[in-house]
Image (cartoon, rainbow, N blue to C red):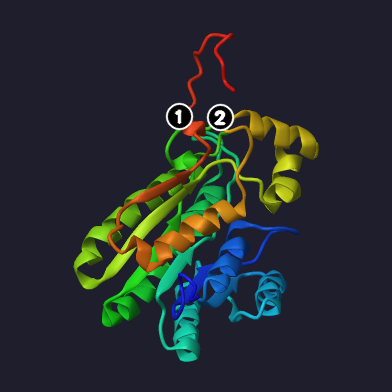
């Protein structure tokens, strides 16, 4: 039985992982391939993205890798050309690069702000701009951008640049969706909340709980009405839907993956049943 993405070419940025396990990009690339897509996996870390490709290839599916700084326009244009030279088309783009930096409006250094703008937002513009002519020419395409619940509501961490960029991505996606709706190109946004990806162990634990991974996991799980964090495959399943023809009437939309965290009521009585 054909997969849901059979015959499609998917370019996924941030397709490596910051540590062992399933980050959003690695999970998405692997699931896309399982669903029949030819995957063009992009990351700044060659070793990490090669590991993703090996997983895909070991399962008998097709994936090639490309190392690219997606914040550089010339590098992005070369990346897009390489994908088209290899596969002849690009049907799905997922912009999956991003990361947070601590700091509020008064104490964040200008250099940190600028790096966050490039790392989280500029690349979305550059890669989308480069891929649009191909999708417009073919009169079909799905662009998937990654925001965050930090772009919806205050999450308790002082990371003003991250919140700003993730909110901006939502508006960017809507603008692209309406501009290109008549030319066959769709653009949607995935909004993850607290996920248990390798970033929890490799970076967040040292930043927030002094390296105590179990404490951080318990803290993050406690914020979620469903009782536990999601993972990279929750993002991947949403991306498969948005990249497939099942979502042919979906553009300018958002899929929030947060276990109802952003809906959580904080003023319930102590004896209110939660299970």
User: From where the camera sits, is residue 55 visible?
Assistant: yes
Residue 73 at x, y percent in the picture: 45, 73
Identify the residue at horizontal 71%, vertical 72% (top origin).
51
Position of 137 relative to 45 (above/below): below
Pick the quarter of the image with the C terminus.
Answer: top right
Position of 220 relative to 99 (above/below): above
- Crowding at mark 2 (Cα within 10 Å: few <14, some 14-19, many 20+): some
The one of 191 and 250 positioned closer to us in this rendering: 250
The one of 118 and 100 positioned closer to us in this rendering: 100
| Mark-to-mark CA distance, 1 and 2 | 9 Å
The one of 72 and 109 positioned closer to us in this rendering: 72
**Residue 174 appears left or right of 74:** left
Identify the residue at horizontal 52%, vertical 52% (top origin).
116
User: From where the camera sits, is residue 154 visible?
Assistant: no
Classify mark 1: helix, strand or loop.
Answer: helix
User: Which residue position holds label 1?
Assistant: 263
- Residue furthest toward the front? 1
Residue 38 at x, y percent in the picture: 52, 79
Position of 185 relative to 206 (above/below): below
- Residue furthest toward the bottom? 85
Residues under numbered marks 1 and 2 in contact, where contact means CB atoms less than 8 Å apart: yes
**Residue 107 appears left or right of 18:** left
Of the numbered discs 1 and 2, the one sitting upstream in the chain is 2
Identify the residue at horizontal 22%, vertical 72% (top origin).
183
Label drawn at residue 225 = 2
Q: How many marks?
A: 2
Residue 179 at x, y percent in the picture: 22, 63
Identify the residue at horizontal 60%, vertical 68% (top origin).
30
């Amino acid at each position: 039985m054909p997969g849901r993405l059979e015959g499609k070419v998917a370019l996924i940025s941030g397709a490596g992982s910051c540590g062992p396990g399933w980050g959003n990009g690695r999970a998405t690339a692997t699931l896309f391939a399982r669903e029949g897509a030819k995957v063009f996996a992009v990351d700044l870390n060659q070793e990490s993205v090669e590991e993703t490709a090996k997983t895909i290839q070991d399962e008998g599916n097709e994936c090639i890798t490309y190392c690219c700084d997606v914040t550089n326009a010339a590098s992005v244009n070369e990346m897009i050309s390489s994908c088209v030279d290899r596969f002849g088309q690009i049907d799905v783009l997922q912009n999956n690069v991003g990361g947070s930096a601590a700091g509020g409006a008064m104490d964040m250094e200008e250099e940190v702000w600028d790096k966050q703008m490039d790392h989280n937002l500029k690349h979305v513009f550059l890669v989308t701009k480069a891929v649009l002519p191909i999708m417009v020419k073919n009169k079909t395409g799905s662009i998937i951008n990654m925001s965050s619940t930090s772009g919806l509501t205050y999450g308790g961490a002082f990371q003003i640049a991250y919140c700003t960029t993730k909110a901006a991505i939502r508006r960017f996606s809507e603008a692209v969706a309406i501009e290109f709706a008549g030319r066959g190109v769709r653009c949607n946004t995935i909004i993850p909340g607290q996920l248990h990806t390798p970033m929890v162990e490799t970076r967040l634990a040292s930043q927030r709980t002094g390296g105590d991974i179990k404490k951080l996991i318990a803290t993050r799980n406690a914020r979620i009405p469903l009782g536990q964090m999601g993972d990279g495959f929750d993002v991947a399943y949403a991306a498969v839907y948005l990249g497939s023809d099942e979502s042919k009437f979906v553009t300018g939309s958002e899929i929030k993956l947060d276990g109802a965290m952003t809906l959580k009521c904080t003023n319930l009585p102590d004896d209110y049943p939660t299970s």
